[in-house]
Amino acid sequence: MRVQSFHAPGLAPICFDNKAWHISIDGETAYGRTFRNAFGFYENLAAVNDERGWFHIHPDGVSAYAERHSWCGNFQGGRCVVCTGGRYYHIDPEGHSPYSQTYAYAGDFREGCAVVTNADGLCGHILANGTPAHPHRYRNLDVYHKGYARAQDENGWTHIDRSGMPAYENRYSSVEPFYNGRALTQTFNHKTLLINELGDAVVVIKDPAPSATENNTSERYRQFHELSSDMVGYWKTFAIAASVKLNVPEKLPLADTAMTDCFGESAANMKLLLAALAQMNITANTDGVWNLTSKGSLLLANGDFSLADAAVSWGTFATSGADAWVDAISGKNKADFFAEISRDISKVERSQKTLAAYAKNDYEFLADMLPLDNVRHLLDAGGGSGTVARMIVRKWQNLNITILDRADVLSLFDDRDNPGGRITKLGGDIFLDWQTGADAVLLARVLHDWNDQKAALILAKANLALPLGGKLFVVEADGEATGAMVSLHLLTVGGGRQRTRQEYQALMAENGFSFVEHRYLNRSASLLIGEKIK
């Protein structure tokens, strides 16, 4: 006989002779039926299972609903996790799911949110009605505790706030939840720290310190190889680009025993490439068979979020060497990347496919976050081959969009994919007369390509295209978050750079716009909203 803990309303599950039921504190049977398994009451409902499956009962033993599941959890916050057919979702006390989505896994609700795991392995928070609590996803994620949730991204563990954004810049090998404004963390060099909600260390709990000689030697060794690794970072770029050019992703899965038949005399070299890709978690060898990982599948040429063209483009950039960076940093580089590639339509196409892949990934929630209720005509300046415009018109059914871009770019627009015929193309130069007006202007990753003078000129043209009160939507990364390396790349390509939110606000003000609002999209992009005031 096994009796579990008593829960309100004063009942405990008991298991005896392969049967389970609930008893009261005085040992009396609570109702007249038995189950295969029974668990404690939470919010006046208990999970049980019979020969048909898992479900919930009331304290009097009456079933809360007719459906049966593969597994049931316990009710928290008016919701309970259930599993049916290997997919997880939540139900209410009547057994109904408040949303249609299912997940690879789902957890309990706490402080109004639950963690769900998608098919790609990334985790997010949802509200009780199933809508995302924020647009951000992480490798690992916890429920909110006193306004913060533990989250792990590609750089380590952190705490996120209600917006889904990290509360501070540092990353740790582990973090515990905040309690009264303090959280225990461990750094990657094994220090144990107590931090505040700004990420600042307030107490060093443990600092394992080697001897002075050991410390100097090990630190020099670490720095030497860290710098060496940084210097040969282009090896990864070239390996990925080579794999795409050699159509390796499309040739997998492939057994070791079939390597020679597939690659002939280069089989040994190809195996080296696959092993190098495995070090980046792009490929994996299981039982003698090479496969693409989930991450590696992004290199398939025909994937929805394919980075195949981007891999080749970045590989091409890398071949220009350090001299181009030297010229750019010295102020000698006057090249216009976009003008140069316009001479070769194949380069234009590859560039647009690269930008489209990033847009699909980074702008997944952009259409939801744009305030377009009173906008009938949106001008997407520098809108490329239409990826972002399509995402927006599919969300906003009464909206028409004009894409302004160079004629060679607009030639790549697929006229067969024009929802309701509501997207119009306008060939032109973004620095010259735009030849049209609109209720709102969108500049998605346009301004960062140019120096302050040219960015100001673009904003001046946007101002001319708008009526008083017209909206300006600028989508860019926050320069403080993305760092200097991206800015150096932009400087080399066209003289541009990443800017801080305050710098974009200043540019807006100088060109007749008031700053209205800032909205986070994700770690790669934010939405800045302005309004024409003069």
Image (cartoon, rainbow, N blue to C red):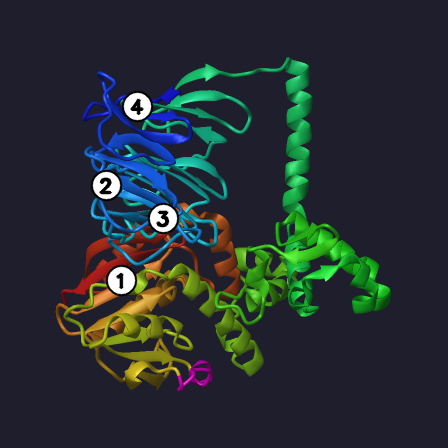
Label 3 to label 4: alpha-carbon separation = 37 Å
Residue 499: x and y in percent read: 37, 53
Identity of the residue drawn at 37% across and 64% down: 447
Residue 162's image quarter? top left
* Residue assigned mark 4: 179
Residue mark closest to the camera, 4 vs 2? 2
Q: Which mark is residue 368?
A: 1
Residues rendered magenta in the picture: 407-416
- Mark 2 and mark 1 in contact? Answer it, CB < 8 Å: no
* Label 2: element kind: loop
Identity of the residue drawn at 22% across and 80% down: 437
Label 4 to label 2: alpha-carbon separation = 19 Å
Residue mark closest to the camera, 3 vs 2? 3
Q: Which mark is residue 112?
A: 2
First reached walking from the N terminus: tag 1 or tag 3: 3
Residue 28 seen by the camera: yes
Q: Nearer the viewer, residue 123 or 384?
A: 123
* Label 1: element kind: helix
Residue 438: x and y in percent read: 21, 77
* Label 4: element kind: loop
- Mark 1 and mark 3 in contact? Answer it, CB < 8 Å: no
Badge 4 amino acid: Tyr
Residue 245's image quarter? bottom right
